[in-house]
Amino acid sequence: MSTEPILATHAAAPHGASHAHATVSGLPAPTAHHFVDLVQQEEAEKLGMWTFLITEVMFFGALFTAYTVYRNMYPEAFLLASSKLNWRLGGVNTLVLIVSSLTMAMSIRCAQTSKRGLMLMNIVLTGLFGATFLVIKYFEYSEKWHHHLMPGPTFNYAEFGQWGPQARIFFSLYFAMTGLHAFHMIVGLGLMTWVFIKARSGHFTPRRYAGMEISGLYWHFVDLVWIFLFPMLYLLGAHHHLA
Amino acid sequence: MSTHPGQPHVLPLHIYWGVFFALVVGTIGTVWVATFDLGPWNTPIALTIAVTKGLLVILFFMHVKYSTKLTWLFVAAGFVWFLIMVCITMADFVSRSWL
């Protein structure tokens, strides 16, 4: 038996001291049979999420590129259109997302250090801040709707003088970019619900919390996108607005 | 610097709080700067602050600073590819008026 291949000790059937914990708690062995060890498995899980996030960089990147092209073409129109956005609400939402990123990072740290109560609280707070962001976004969207700034048949061209059609391009980009971002927030809230249910049932341990770690990567990425959306959309015309 | 089974790489709390306060200061700073008309400088300053905030999120909140070189390569490749898209597209649009 001593000549048994090394890989066999990593098979699902627990018979080594390192797998005793998994057997006792009734959870599946942490390392899947096709990985050499837990370190390799976690590396693969994180790289998998990063691969997805790179496709997200391309996804949002196409919109950022479109924004850059049109803003370069019509700088005055973009400045004027941007001044119609409420930078105070945008700024508050930026802070809300930063706080949610902190609570997300804290919840993972609590999983690493076996602080169950704090971990659950931080997951709930992350979800609540995410929901707060969406509520504020809803009020912003409804205000833009009532002022006829939603691109469509009732778009208020007169508001922008000679720059009506070009301002409409800005608002098309505004709704496409923030709408796509808001959709990602909704998906993130679903992820937080899943993380909370799993965390409450004791799924995440200091040995094995990759599900939380990669959900956190997604959440932080959505925050990262907003860090760029806020100055590009809201602050571009802020001095115009205050002048 | 990867995590080891049973021994997760736990960052000290002051790193998370430090990054958080830097992000808040960056947000307030970028709003404050945006209230002045600095002509062509508004956008470079806003983007510099945004890139700095983004790096803090990626390196510390997303733990990339403490990840393997392979993770670094993946992350860098994603953003370099994005920059290629923006640079080549803008090289076209900006130079059209030169003809």
Image (tube, grey):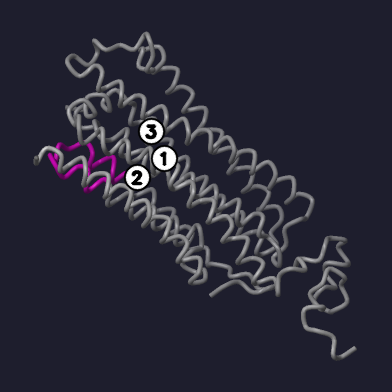
Do callouts 1 and 3 point to residues on the same chain? yes
Is residue B45 located in the magenta-colored stretch of the structure? Answer: yes
The magenta-colored residue range is: B27-46
Classed neighbour count for the residue bearing mark 1: other residues with Cα under 10 Å, few (<14), some (14–19), many (≥20):
many
C-beta proximity under 8 Å, tags 2 and 1 = yes
C-beta proximity under 8 Å, tags 1 and 3 = yes
The secondary element bearing badge 1 is classed as: helix
Instruction: Check the image and report above or below for A108 versus A164.
Output: below
Q: Chief secondary structure of the magenta span?
A: helix
The secondary element bearing badge 2 is classed as: helix
**The label number, if any, that marks residue B27 in the structure image:** 2
Residue type at mark 3: give it.
Gly
Q: CA distance from mark 1 to mark 3?
A: 6 Å
Classed neighbour count for the residue bearing mark 2: other residues with Cα under 10 Å, few (<14), some (14–19), many (≥20):
many
Is residue A177 located in the magenta-colored stretch of the structure? Answer: no
> In the image shown, does A42 or A73 lie closer to the viewer?
A73
Pick out the residue farthest to the front: B99
Do callouts 3 and 2 point to residues on the same chain? no
Tally of marks: 3
Residue A214 at x, y = what percent?
60, 55
